[in-house]
Amino acid sequence: MDISIHDVTQENVQEILKLSVGNSQASFIETTEQCIAEAKICNLYKPVGLYFDGCLVGFAMYGYFPEETENGRVWLDRFLIDSKYQGFGYGTIMLNALIQKLVIEFSCTQIYLSVFEENRAAIHLYQKFGFRFNGEIDLKNEKIMVKNITSLNGQQE
């Protein structure tokens, strides 16, 4: 099992632009095209492709935002598994890999994300990994969740 996370580049952007969630999830997350455009405007975002055994199965966008709070915040801002790969455990595998990557890349003690209250499947997945609602709401009326990290492998306290 080879899990890898690669930056969006000229070589993989067309394949990444083809990724999408199911129709019932479309209102919960921006398209990969919208995400990549947003990352071009705000260079704090890092869009990446999520690969399992060399096959592109998903997309994520994350970043460190130093102006948020005293120590800044690391955000897992977007996370999706392509509709044809959903239901096979890739969400769990890729979220685990992303958490580990963020902890190592940013030496962070917390990871933030936001989610629509109606997105029960995503909330369930995030809670399995120790994300908890912190009472905040973002500009799009999504509830903010935070994961506290205590070790470099991304484990929660």
Image: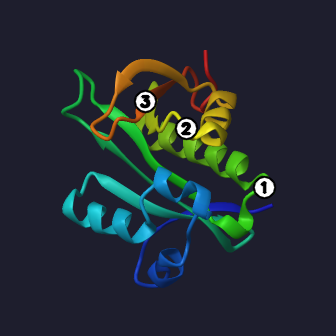
What type is the residue that disc 3 sits on? Lys
Q: Quick one: label 1 or label 3, which is nearer the N terminus?
A: 1
Left or right of 66: which side holds 146? right
- Residue 72 — which label? none
Q: What residue is shown with label 1?
A: 87
- Label 2 element class: loop
Q: Secondary structure under badge 3?
A: strand
Q: Which numbered disc flags the more N-terminal residue, 3 or 2?
A: 2
Please tell me whether mark 1 sits on a helix, a strand or a loop: loop
2 or 1: tag closer to the N-terminus: 1
Q: Residue at x 44, y 67 (%)?
A: 32
Quadrant position of residue 85:
bottom right
Residue ID for mark 3: 143
Which residue is rendered at x = 49% and y = 50% of the image?
28
Label 2 and label 1: CA atoms lie apart by 19 Å
> Measured along the vertical axis of the image, is residue 34 above or below residue 79?
below
Question: Which image quadrant for residue 71?
Answer: top left
The amino acid pointed to by label 1 is Gly
**Quadrant (top left, top right, bottom left, bottom right) of the C terminus:** top right
Q: Residue 15 at what x, y percent from top left?
A: 54, 81
What residue do we see at 62% from left, 25% from top?
Answer: 130
Q: Are marks 3 and 2 in contact (CB under 8 Å)?
A: no
Count the marks: 3
Q: Which residue is mark 2?
A: 118
At a point 67% along the width and 33% down the height, the residue shown is 124
Q: CA distance from mark 3 to mark 2?
A: 10 Å
Q: How far across and how far down the image is residue 109, in percent? A: 45, 24
Q: Position of residue 93 (x, y in %)?
A: 72, 49
**Place of residue 66 in the rendered image (x, y in percent of width and height, measured from the top left):** 23, 35
> Which label sits in the foreground, 2 or 1?
2
